[in-house]
Amino acid sequence: MKILYLVLSIFSLSVSASPFPQLIKSGEGEMDYLFWTIYRAELYVESLPYQEESFPKALKIEYYRDIDSDDLIDATKDQWLHLGINQALINQWTAELPTIWPDISKGDELIIYVSKDGESTFYSGQEGQTVKRLGQVDDNQFGRAFLDIWLSEKTTKPKLRAKLMGNVE
């Protein structure tokens, strides 16, 4: 019944609101590359302070630039390689992502919700629009690995990690 309530509440939300009403914003920050700000990320958790092992979690990313889905998948793969994720898992997940992720336009929001069971569901939308379900990855290792791009101690963006966890620098 909780899942049904969650799904119904998601489809009635505006993307500008908390993507999941039962979650609390832990923190937010922007990702810069050279001279450009690429996106703003917000992390939502069940309770504060941030706890690595506590789920569910949601990460909402608002993109400030157009990004082709293939480029997004390549960047995700590069981050997983940096984190030391198993190559077989990377191959499996990057084969599945093209069926889920669209090309990103400036202003698009991509949201991942990782449940307590480890299911990872992606949603998208734009400011003021209804959230749309994109698809789900059932592998319970995927959600943690995806969130680790931002939340692992080995992330390539430690300042953004600190902000997402609620540690203001």
Image (cartoon, helix red, strand yellow):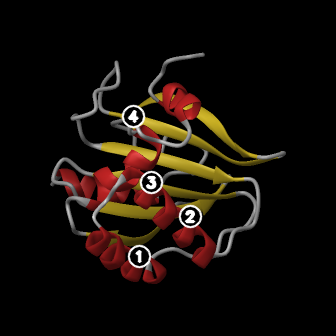
Distance, label 3 to label 4, CA atoms, is 12 Å
Instruction: Check contact, mark 4 vs mark 1: CB within 8 A.
Output: no
Asked whether, in this view, residue 65 is left or right of residue 39, the answer is: right
Bin the neighbour count of mark 2 within 10 Å (Cα to Cα): few under 14, some 14-19, many 20 and up. few
Say which quadrant the C terminus sits in. Answer: top right
Q: Which mark is residue 82?
A: 3
Give the secondary structure at mark 1. helix
The answer to whether residue 169 is above or below residue 152 is above
Residue type for callout 3? His
**Residue 26 x, y percent position in the rendering:** 45, 27
**Residue 32 x, y percent position in the rendering:** 72, 43
The answer to whether residue 104 is above or below residue 4 is below
Distance, label 3 to label 2, CA atoms, is 11 Å
Residue that carries the numbered disc 2 in the rendered image: 75
Q: Which mark is residue 94?
A: 1
Q: Residue at x 56, y 39 (%)?
A: 157
**Residue 99 x, y percent position in the rendering:** 44, 83
Residue that carries the numbered disc 4 in the rendered image: 153
Please identify, in this view, whether the residue under mark 3 or under mark 4 is nearer the observer: 3
Q: Residue at x 19, y 50 (%)?
A: 2
**Residue 95 x, y percent position in the rendering:** 39, 82
Label located before the other in sequence (2 or 1) = 2
Label located before the other in sequence (4 or 1) = 1
Q: Nearer the viewer, residue 132 or 112?
A: 112
Q: Which mark is residue 137?
A: none
Q: Residue at x 27, y 43 (%)?
A: 56
Label located before the other in sequence (1 or 3) = 3
Asked whether, in this view, residue 94 is left or right of residue 4, the answer is: right
Bin the neighbour count of mark 3 within 10 Å (Cα to Cα): few under 14, some 14-19, many 20 and up. few
The answer to whether residue 55 is above or below residue 165 is below
